[in-house]
Image (cartoon, grey):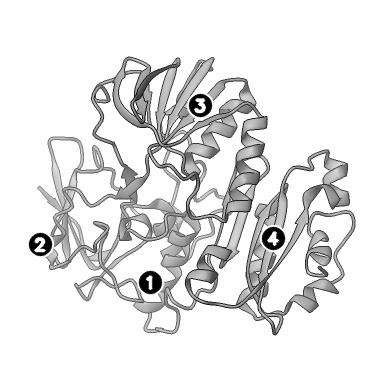
Amino acid sequence: MKKTNKVTLALSSILLAASLAGCSSNSSDGVVRTYKDGKEADVEKAAIKLVKAVKTGDYNLMSVDELKKAIDGKEEMVLEGENIVINTGGRPVIPNIKGIENNKNIFLSEDIMNLEKLPKTLTIIGGGYIGLEFATIYSSFGSDVIIIQNEEEFLPREDEDIVNAIRKTLEEKGIKIITGAKITEIENSTVIYSIGEEESKLESDIILLATGRRPNTDNLCVENAGISLNERGGIKTDDHLRTDAENIWAAGDVCGKLQFTYISLDDSRIILDDMNGNRGRTINNRGAFSYSVFIQPTFSRVGMNEKEAMMNNVKYRVVKLPVMAIPKAKVLRKTEGILKALIKEDGTILGAELFCEESHEMINFMKLAIDNNIKADVIKNFIFTHPTMSESLNDLFSI
């Protein structure tokens, strides 16, 4: 058994480790070269030592300043750190359905991208954001795609008008959506399900499980360091991402909160500041949360939607703009979708929902506006370049 010197340990994200070391992920030296081929980045210039485990479960915490990690299945290394950052990410949720285990026709989001042959037909179990993105990708490649989910309501977090627009667009692209289906068994690549009393079979070449992700804390033995888990099974942290152990932080999906790469990267900023004694940055002051779902066109959102505003008894008015009214959308010949925003009486922008081409870029402007309390009238009169999708915000906030 080997031992290392005491250092700051980042377990186990290369991106987070590079960020904590003050590296830029787009440097000419290529701190992070690729997500896809599994090759780790060359981080030697940042004085980062990379120790690979055999698999995710091959490391566990031993105490508040030690963790044990298997190297090659035979040898173990004990790593000691004055500070430890846990960033083990998330793992797919595998539903308890007969026929899933050891089924070579069933894929997860991590391995479906490695297919060497395009499936003629693809069944996706789960109608969440990951499922929709893969449905769009494989449909554009030419596969016949069917999404099937247990829940009656499609995209339950989103407003009804947005959901209807998204579903209409997906179905016009040939993607079939089945809701309220109870899946009882999978035989090879055939899904057996029932809606009410009627049982049906859904045959396809392969099946994608897109039924959500959960914090990757299995076999981590956090209790050895006095760390507790939250109700979602993630590591419990305070506003500075400190765990119950003073010298251990947790970041990203393992916390059981928002599961996005850019949240994990922002977590690293909070942790680095906290390590250096600057406690001004917290998870509560990073502003409105924005996200994009990369379907065609992209759906992006920031701040409150109508469901949340009504739930919180917030008074608002709604402004909407059909994408077909946007000059740039006509130039792109992609006029599907709708733009929507919620505004308070004093002009404060509560939120924006953009279902259109390039919305993943536009939403960042809207987040900046919300975070800095820029009123609707300012955006209405803002001078955008032409022709762009962003200039449609002039018209949206003029309504």
Given residues 285 and 250, the one toward you in this image is 285
Q: Secondary structure at mark 4?
A: strand
Amino acid carrying mark 1 in the image:
Ile
Residue picked out by circle 3:
146
Q: CA distance from mark 1 to mark 3?
A: 42 Å
Q: CA distance from mark 1 to mark 4?
A: 35 Å
Residue picked out by circle 1:
271
Given residues 97 and 263, the one toward you in this image is 97
Q: CA distance from mark 2 to mark 1?
A: 22 Å
Q: Earlier in the sequence, mark 1 or mark 4?
A: 1
Q: Quadrant of residue 237?
A: bottom left
Residue picked out by circle 4:
340
Amino acid carrying mark 3 in the image:
Ile
Amino acid carrying mark 2 in the image:
Asn
Find residue 204 and report its horizontal and vertical position in percent.
Answer: 45, 16
Q: Give me the disc on residue 119.
A: none
Answer yes or no: do the residues labelled 2 and 1 have beta carbons within 8 Å? no
Q: Residue at x 58, y 28 (%)?
A: 175
